[in-house]
Amino acid sequence: MTERDRVPGRLPEDLTLRRPGPADHARLQVALAEWWGGLGGAAGARQRQLLVPRLFLQHFADTSFLVERPDGTLHAFLIGFLSQTEPEAAYIHFVGVCPEGRRDGVGSALYDRFFATARAAGRSRVRCITSPNNRNSIAYHTRMGFRLEPGDRIDDAGVPVHTDYDGPGLDRVSFVREW
Ligand SMILES: CC(C)(COP(=O)(O)OP(=O)(O)OC[C@H]1O[C@@H](n2cnc3c(N)ncnc32)[C@H](O)[C@@H]1OP(=O)(O)O)[C@@H](O)C(=O)NCCC(=O)NCCS
């Protein structure tokens, strides 16, 4: 899909979108291990898997999306929710597009749909975080209109990093997009 063809929220025609459910947990776990290009090795894969436990598919399905190919195989997903604590905010917890389906507007279509869901719920801000070593994710989020929130240090690439954000050694980059 070229830039010119992009319509906010529109997916390539052969793909279908639905809410995820608990029955999708096992294949999401496979995607979390395999779609990140080996980022963080086996420990990184396990960390990602543990970050998407079944509860997200039980209790956050209404603000999450799953994209399937015509044969029913998994193409992409987004796990997000409306903040209970910050009434203006929504949060994107995880997004993944299968490696062979990237740069085709699927990630941005899922984000557009999540932004629309957040707006419809009266939210004016979307937050998310990523790992400092996930450069593709930083480039993608910047392109999606997020700004990087100030951290406690700037890394070699000029990215603001929150050291030990999620525990010792678990540095994160924090994004926010407002409207
Ligand atoms: C990040 C990710 C979700 C993007 O999904 P996608 O469907 O490829 O994204 P889109 O095609 O909608 O890209 C939109 C724009 O973002 C930017 N972008 C996306 N991927 C990029 C990359 N790898 N490098 C630089 N810019 C990128 C581009 O500007 C792109 O527009 P363009 O293709 O017209 O240049 C996907 O690469 C992915 O699943 N990565 C592995 C998992 C991950 O890192 N998830 C995010 C952290 S939880």
Image (spheres, helix red, strand yellow):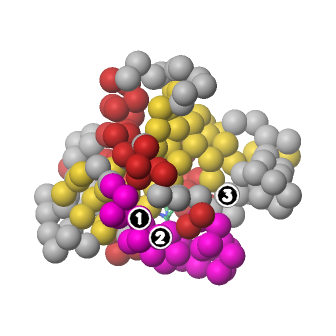
Q: Earlier in the sequence, mark 2 or mark 3?
A: 2
**Vertical placement of residue 103 versus 31, above or below:** above
Residue type beneath disc 3: Ser
> Does residue 153 show up magenta in the picture?
no
Number of numbered discs on residues? 3
Q: Name the residue under label 3.
A: 131
Q: Which of 118 and 59 is in front in this view?
A: 59
What is the distance, in whole Å, between disc 2 and disc 1 at their CAs? 6 Å
Q: Position of residue 49 (x, y in %)?
A: 56, 67
Q: Is residue 4 visible?
A: no
Relative to 83, is 46 above or below? below
Whether residue 69 is visible:
yes
**Which residue type carries mark 2?**
Gln
Please give the residue where the numbered disc 1 appears in the rendered image.
25
- Indicate the amino acid at tag 1: His
Tell me: is circle 3 under 8 Å from ligand 1. yes
For the point 16% across and 74% down, the residue is 71
| Left or right of 120 in this view: 38 | right
Quick check: 177 above or below 152?
above
Could you tell me residue 131's position as x and y percent? 67, 57
Dot 1: element:
helix
Q: Give the range drawn in magenta.
A: 21-48
**Residue nearest the observer in this picture, 172 or 74:** 74
